[in-house]
Image: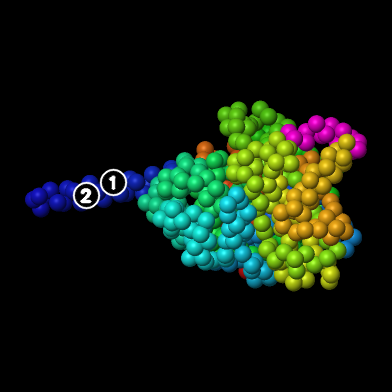
């Protein structure tokens, strides 16, 4: 190439680079859509005080935004709450969570609460009792994880090693995400382990890696039963390996003294920063102005709260169908796409207060009992055929000493039936007519207790001092979650990763956070969802004004 040709090439590249820069800066990049002139003008109302709403409130209040959280229940937390019966303080939902050295640690640090948390390192990841194999998954020990599985499946040693290598590979990639959200364009190149399962179910991906035995897949994927709430044949490989990678790479913990502690710490942080939390304040409507933009909310008692920024931590279906009355302001294409998303499963949980220290008879924290395949157990759960099904059993006193009062212990039994298996009681339940409902609840309780007595702890039924249970109707009543959804929306391949529900909505000024939005469900998913929603809200606010709000408070 001649000198002139080189000059021309450089000139063309420079012009092209400038054009790309101008396009992304002025046209493709998100532009501010809110222009606040004062701190008072930047009011935020948050509907619901689940971990998503509380984390959003803490993040915003720490930056000087006037925050008001409206909660329908008597206490904050959503599923991160407790209830008391006699001598026992029952954990509603927390099973286990990975926190140290993860994105969740970063989010909770930004929210001002991580250094106040006390975590109990659990004795194991999980135990699974399946046909032909009793598998105890050690904490953060990939060598032992492999060895335990090879004992049961010696012919699959190479495939087991490949899967565990994949788990640790995803763990390393997830660590890099702490530096910033992975780009959609660069994701396949920077995250080859995670990307290799995109579009596949966990079953399909493990088969692709050489696993032949279905029971082996079910053992490796034991987290499906309480973390992802879908069996290996349905759950997205990306999300399943994400959970496994967090657990194996960073360990699993319980939040002391209860999961509700996290909710309380977030609420205290909000109040410390001038925010307001109102309980027993159910929202009836999200108010819009003449332009179709959010202008606040109205409570069931008629009281209104004005705010140009509204965040819903309620279920997306409840938000769009019930709280937004002016349906003509919501694009039909958005609603059609939203309602196509499959609602997550619900749960039946037996809460058991024991008059003995059960941890002395059974030292495992969490056990999944699978009398058949994971798929068969899930189908039995969904149909309400619990006599044939497996279950998850937890003794919380194996998490840390002192969980229960001296001489006592606390346990749960968890399964995941469909809402439809309890729907025949719904109409009477809502009217307060619960006789038939209570009979069925007792029948399920007795069946599950007898299973634990037969499989794990002889004489277990005689140890029970208090027994209570929650059904899909219970969770629907207390959370307004669609069909009593227990975790988030279903984590299937079609809606995995970047295809999760966005935090922005078509209504200007209305955002959604929580387990039903990106990145997904549970104790890690809801706070991370709030952080993602917070970042998007900051993109939508005029940069200079956002800086002024922050400077005013430091």
Q: Looking at this view, is 279 or 39 the one in front?
A: 279
Quadrant location of the C terminus in the rendered image: bottom right
Number of other residues with Cα within 10 Å of mark 2, as a class: few under 14, some 14 to 19, many 20 or more: few
Image coordinates of residue 425 in percent, x first then y, are: 83, 34
Determine whether 175 is above or below 423 in the image.
below
Q: Which residue is drawn at 72% across and 70% down?
A: 400
As drawn, is 354 to the left or to the right of 183? Answer: right
Q: Mark 1 points at which residue?
A: 16
Q: What stretch is highlighted in magenta?
A: 417-435
Tell me how many marks there are: 2
Decide which of 188, 359 is in the foreground and name it.
Answer: 359
Q: Can residue 332 be seen in this view?
A: yes
Residue 431 falls inside the magenta stretch: yes
Task: Give the prevailing secondary structure in the magenta stretch.
Answer: helix
Q: Which of marks 1 and 2 is nearer the N terminus?
A: 2
Q: Tag 2's secondary structure?
A: helix
User: For residue 326, which quarter of the picture?
Assistant: top right
* Residue located beneath label 2 in the image: 11
């Amino acid at each position: 190439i001649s000198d002139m040709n080189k000059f021309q090439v450089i000139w063309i590249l420079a012009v092209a680079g400038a054009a790309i820069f101008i396009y992304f800066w002025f046209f493709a990049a998100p532009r501010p859509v809110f222009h606040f002139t004062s701190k008072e003008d930047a009011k935020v109302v948050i509907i619901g005080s689940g971990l998503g709403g509380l984390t959003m409130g803490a993040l915003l209040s720490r930056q000087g935004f006037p925050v008001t959280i409206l909660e329908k229940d008597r206490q904050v937390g959503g599923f991160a709450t407790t209830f008391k019966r006699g001598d026992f303080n029952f954990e509603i939902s927390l099973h286990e969570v990975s926190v140290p050295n993860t994105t969740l640690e970063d989010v909770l640090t930004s929210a001002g609460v991580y250094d106040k948390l006390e975590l109990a390192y659990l004795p194991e990841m999980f135990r699974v009792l399946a046909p032909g194999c009793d598998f105890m998954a050690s904490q953060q020990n990939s060598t032992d994880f492999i060895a335990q599985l090879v004992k049961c499946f010696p012919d699959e040693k190479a495939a087991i090693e490949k899967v565990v290598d994949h788990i640790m590979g995803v763990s390393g990639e997830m660590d890099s995400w702490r530096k910033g959200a992975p780009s959609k364009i660069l994701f396949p190149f920077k995250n080859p382990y995670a990307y290799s399962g995109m579009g596949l179910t966990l079953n399909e991906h493990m088969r692709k890696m050489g696993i032949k035995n279905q029971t082996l897949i079910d053992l490796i994927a034991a987290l499906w039963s309480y973390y992802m709430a879908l069996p290996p044949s349905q759950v997205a490989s990306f999300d399943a390996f994400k959970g496994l990678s967090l657990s194996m790479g960073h360990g699993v913990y319980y939040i002391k003294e209860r999961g509700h502690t996290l909710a309380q710490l977030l609420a205290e942080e909000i109040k410390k920063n001038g925010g307001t939390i109102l309980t027993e304040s159910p929202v009836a409507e999200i108010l819009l102005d003449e332009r179709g933009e959010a202008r606040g909310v109205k409570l069931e008692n008629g009281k209104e709260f004005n705010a140009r920024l509204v965040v819903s931590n309620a279920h997306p279906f409840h938000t769009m169908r019930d709280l937004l009355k002016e349906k003509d302001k919501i694009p039909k294409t958005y609603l059609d796409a939203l309602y196509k998303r499959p609602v997550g499963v619900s749960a039946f949980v037996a809460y058991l207060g024991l008059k003995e220290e059960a941890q002395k008879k059974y030292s495992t924290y969490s056990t999944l009992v699978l009398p058949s395949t994971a798929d068969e157990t899930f189908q039995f759960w969904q149909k309400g055929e619990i006599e044939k099904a497996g279950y998850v059993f937890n003794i919380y006193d194996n998490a840390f000493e002192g969980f229960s009062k001296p001489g006592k212990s606390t346990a749960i039994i968890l399964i995941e039936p469909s809402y439809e298996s309890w729907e025949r009681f719904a109409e009477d339940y809502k009217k307060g007519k619960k006789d038939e409902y209570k009979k069925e609840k007792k029948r399920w309780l007795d069946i599950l207790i007898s299973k634990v007595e037969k499989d794990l702890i002889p004489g277990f039924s005689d140890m029970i001092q208090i027994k209570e249970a929650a059904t899909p109707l219970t969770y629907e009543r207390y959370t307004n979650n669609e069909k009593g959804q227990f975790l988030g929306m279903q984590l299937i391949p079609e809606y995995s990763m970047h295809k999760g529900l966005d935090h922005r909505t078509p209504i200007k000024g209305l955002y959604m956070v929580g387990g039903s939005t990106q990145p997904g469900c549970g104790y890690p998913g809801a706070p991370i969802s709030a952080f993602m929603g917070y970042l998007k809200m900051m993109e939508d606010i005029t940069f200079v004004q956002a800086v002024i709000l922050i400077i005013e408070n430091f």
